[in-house]
Image: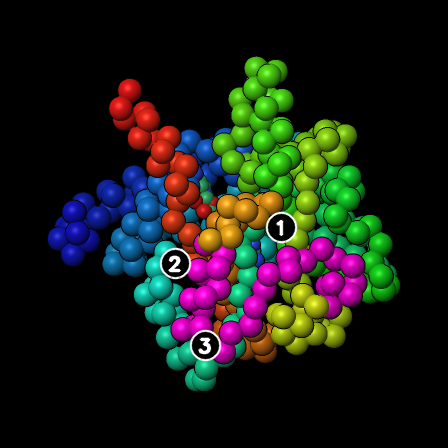
Amino acid sequence: KEIKQLTTKEAKQEIQELQDRLTDYGIAYYEKDAPLVEDHVYDAQYARLQALEQAFPQFISQDSPTQNVGGAATKSGLPKVQHPVPMLSLGDVFSLDELQDWEDRTKKSLGFQPKYNLELKIDGLAINLKYEQGKLIQASTRGNGLVGEDVTANVNTIDDVPKILKEPVTVEVRGEIYMPKASFAKLNEEREAEGQEPFANPRNAAAGSLRQLDANETKKRQLSAFIYYTAEPDQIGVTTQDGLLERFRELGLPTNPDNRVIDQMTDIRPYLEEYTEKRDSLPYGIDGVVVKVNNFDDQVDLGNTVKVPRWAIAYKFPPEEEETVVLDIEWTV
Ligand code: NAD
């Protein structure tokens, strides 16, 4: 039913149902690394909930999945870590029109046309790395954004993550831990051979592998990393997102090489086309492109909501062909 046609009572009931269902999906996905539905099913219901809550804001509850960064750090048995600067999620859009709306709002807020840094949206899980005088002293997951899990021993087994930076800087950086496609295929083969349930996708596999109580288990899983964020750019003397990635490279941090700066949103098309085409041949999974306002002062001016930064947005690719094929087969059986 169209939102405009709903009575208040109907809206309240649908909002409640969606909040409950998406919470259950979230627990299965974030805490058990075993999703109950495919991402595009989750995304469609999440978008509906967001639209309903916007039309009927009196029914937004603090527990709603739209108000919380997914994933409580409760059940794994790993020690907890507080994040003084919360680790946020990203808003997402699924079309160029929605992207344009986001740019219009951003320009209006800033009062001018900002440059954007485009990055691939790596399909992994967020990680926070604390370096003191160039030495890695702690690694933690996002958890619910405010409290994550201490995975230092596990991250110490990942070759890509430097234990010592090339300069003795003290800085906290964030990025993505991911499982390359080849490692994912191998891991699922092994699991199936041992009669274990295969992981649904590389992101769940990476999350499950990183949050092992036994770091030796993580070591076997061949995880990798790309780092793309710090809340304290002054510590390493940078003022823009593309400058940050350059600086990370100098420091020896693993960064994705495929970022690009554009002057306005209409210039995004070639990048989207290029990576939609290259997506399958990349050795790691991507589920979209992240657009970030490039200048850090502008990012600070735009700020964050409780859940997402206003200075960035994820453009999500449509679900992969494969999934449709699988469904087709099921329907004809
Ligand atoms: P998200 O994964 O869509 O986006 C936010 C994250 O993107 C960040 O936390 C960061 O870790 C990551 N990221 C990757 N590359 C990045 C880059 N270059 N710059 C900045 N960040 C980058 O958001 P989310 O809130 O973690 O999860 C929502 C996603 O999880 C949706 O895609 C949804 O479909 C899926 N999900 C699925 C289910 C299910 O049941 N299938 C349940 C819950 C969530």
The residue wearing badge 3 is: 264
Describe the element under mark 3 as helix, strand or loop.
loop
Characterize the local packing of mark 1: few (<14), some (14-19) or many (20 or more) Cα atoms within 10 angstroms. many
Q: Mark 3 near mark 1, Cβ–Cβ under 8 Å?
A: no
**Residue at the image point whose x is 63% and y is 74% from the top:** 240
Looking at the image, residue 234 lies above or below residue 67: below
Q: Which disc is residue 227 wearing?
A: none
- Mark 2 element type: strand
Image quadrant occupied by the C terminus: top left
Residue underneath mark 1: 176
**Mark nearer the N terminus (3 vs 1):** 1
Q: Is residue 109 above or below residue 102?
A: below
Q: Is mark 1 within 8 Å of ligand 1?
A: yes
User: How far separated are the C-alphas under marks 1 and 2?
Assistant: 20 Å
Find disc 2 in the rendering and name its residue: 93
Residue furthest toward the bottom? 111
Instruction: Determine the image quadrant of residue 74.
Output: top right
- Magenta-drawn segment: 247-276
Q: Amino acid at mark 2?
A: Val
Residue at 60% across, 16% down: 193
Give 231 or 68, whichever is nearer the viewer. 231
Q: CA distance from mark 3 to mark 1?
A: 26 Å
Instruction: Check mark 3 vs ligand 1: CB closer than 8 Å? yes or no.
Output: no
Between disc 3 and disc 1, the foreground one is: 3
